[in-house]
Amino acid sequence: MSHSNPSPHVPAGPVRPGPGARTVLRPAVTADIRGGFWRDRREVNARVGIPQGPELLESAGNLHDLRLAAGKAEGEFRGDYPFMDSDVHKWLEAASWQLGHAHDPALAADVERITALVAAAQQPDGYLNTWFQAGKGAGRYTDLRWGHELYCAGHLIQAAVAHHRSTGDKALLEVAVRFADQIDATFGPDKPIDGFDGHPEVETALVELYRETGERRYLDLAAYFVDRHGHGLLGGEAYCQDRVPLREQENVEGHAVRQLYLLAAAADLAAETGDGELLAACERLWTAMVATKTHVTGGLGAHHDEEDFGDPFELPNERAYCETCAAVASVHFGWRMALLTGRARYSDLIERTLFNGFLAGVSLDGERWLYVNPLQVRDGHTDTGGDQSARRTRWFRCACCPPNVMRLLASLEHYVASTDAGGLQLHQYATGRYGGLLGDAPAAVRVETDFPWSGTVRVTVEEGPADRPWTLSLRVPQWCAGHRVSVAGQDVPAAADDGWLRLERAWTAGEEVVLELDMAPRLVEADPRVDAVRGCVAIERGPLVYCLEGVDNPGGLDDVVLDPTGPLTEEEHPELLGGVTTVTAAGYRRTLPNDGWWPYRTTAGPAHTDARSTPRHDAGPALTAVPYYSWANREDGAMRVWVPTS
Ligand code: FUB
Ligand code: ZN
């Protein structure tokens, strides 16, 4: 059924700004990750992650629920949530992006079978939500705060766009269009319902549907939904993004994933309509989020309660929420902002998120997941898995995160490079080939790198406009203390401008640029207002945040102290955790006398000392740190990112 479609002029990936879009940059048209770190993670996703989907969706009941709605099964609805369908849709999206890379008859057959099931479950007027169709809840669109009908529709639309872009096949797109038309007939100022879904998602999906079909009314519907937030229609709760209109909001708030999906939609709208007020709101909110509500891993969402962002600088460790879906959503939002503005800072956060808060969400073998991504697990922690657990789990009751990881990994190449009329920009460093149009002229580069283990990135120009100079822009990451660059073996001035190293010249095919990024391990500390980690440091190397794991540091982690005056030593371990570079730091253990039942005491001023307040410093073995993304892949145990220094 599938056939390869992609036009040579438009990218067959997510986020495809329309011809009139006001983005500073355009996503690369061709993008192909061919080697290195991300190829390996994507290979696991393709070999294990995505193929296991149908079986897991079967055992969790999602496919049964579709059969129930289609009249092909009997029994009770299975699963606890009205958004069970969205897991299927997200899996279909992931599988569709994967089919765009490689012909895979078994995967194509699964997609065809599940698409037919989704189509069969759809009601004649286009509506589709198996929870409500099974008679659960009070009926269609009666619970916009929690019903998730438009959220599920959004994921269906995104899957359909992915399938159409990757394969040219219209089967799923036709289902999505029927549902979008039903929604368009139902929601609006002069339609039966003036409202929006408490969980944004349909908004950004409708913009993509507009891009895919050219139907302007989908864009208008997305704009309507975005602007109906914040007027109290859903009770005025921040949880539903309804406390204040986005255009007036000063900081991100409420449910982190909901906020970020809404922001992605706002950025899409700003791109397609040139709405400067929305763009300003997106910039303001991204900046406030990064400055006050982002964990060092790029993780977002401080509260388990309501999956909420929390207050500025409220960034706990063991109770960090940092939902994997929020990391995915942050990448989605950030990439739209990178394209809109051309600023490197957005891709800085994308890099940090991808290598840390996002990638920790999936195990190295692709079979177990983390929904929440804490920054500390204490000695003696006993939880053994499940939703919102600090232990990897095969699947969740609320299984939003795993298929989200699958779809981002399967489309990751589209977040690497962009073009504008004057040149090509590399936002991320991943071995592969990336190309696009500089105006009408094609340009392409080949990238070879062992990043993030090595800081050497070789970029070879493969083609470009022959009649004029053009600019190859390389992002110099925010964490990088020093860099050098050479062209055809000659060092060239390497000053970065707002994060971009711009190399303008009349390039000839075969010319090679070598960028050397300083990868020396470093210690970082947090703004003092982050009370949770005051007096602590974290270890970083390149884009990777490191953590201590109990298995590498016998004796526990609750009482370790890192000596910041000691050396940081890196060592390659090809045999460990799929091949990592470890970092060791000098440290010791505080040995506090275990002589009391009460862990608090009255202070007597700075001069006061006694046996309890003067810990014994037992010089200990060096502290061994591994990349945070690789934690929880061995025996269960303690872990910490932030380590006290005194
Ligand atoms: O509500 C749907 C998804 O489930 C959200 O995006 C996640 O935060 C989880 O609550
Ligand atoms: Zn999730």
Image (cartoon, grey):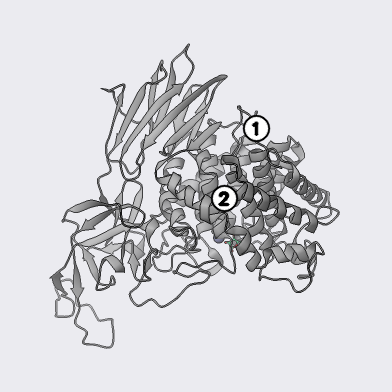
Identify the residue shown where x is 46% and y is 54%: 358
Identify the residue shown where x is 27% and y is 55%: 582
Q: Amino acid at mark 1?
A: Gly
**Foreground pick, 545 / 160:** 160
The crowd level at tag 2 (other Cα within 10 Å; few <14, some 14-19, many 20+) is many
Position of the N terminus by quadrant: top right
**Foreground pick, 423 / 460:** 460
Residue 168 point in image, percent of width and height: 69, 37
CB contact under 8 Å: marks 1 and 2: no
Mark linked to residue 373: none
Residue 48 point in image, percent of width and height: 52, 56
- Please, what secondary structure does the residue beneath circle 2 have? helix
Q: In the rendered image, which residue does mark 2 sit on?
A: 407
Q: Is residue 548 left or right of residue 327?
A: left
Q: Amino acid at mark 2?
A: Arg
Residue 376 is drawn in which quadrant? bottom left
Q: Is residue 588 above or below residue 101?
A: below
Which residue occupies the extreme front position in the image?
Answer: 105
Position of the C terminus by quadrant: bottom left
Q: Within 8 Å: ligand 1 and the Cβ of disc 1?
A: no
Q: Is residue 179 above or below residue 132?
A: above
Residue 459 point in image, percent of width and height: 38, 29
Q: Is residue 514 above or below residue 317?
A: above
Mark linked to residue 18: 1
Identify the residue shown where x is 27% and y is 40%: 518
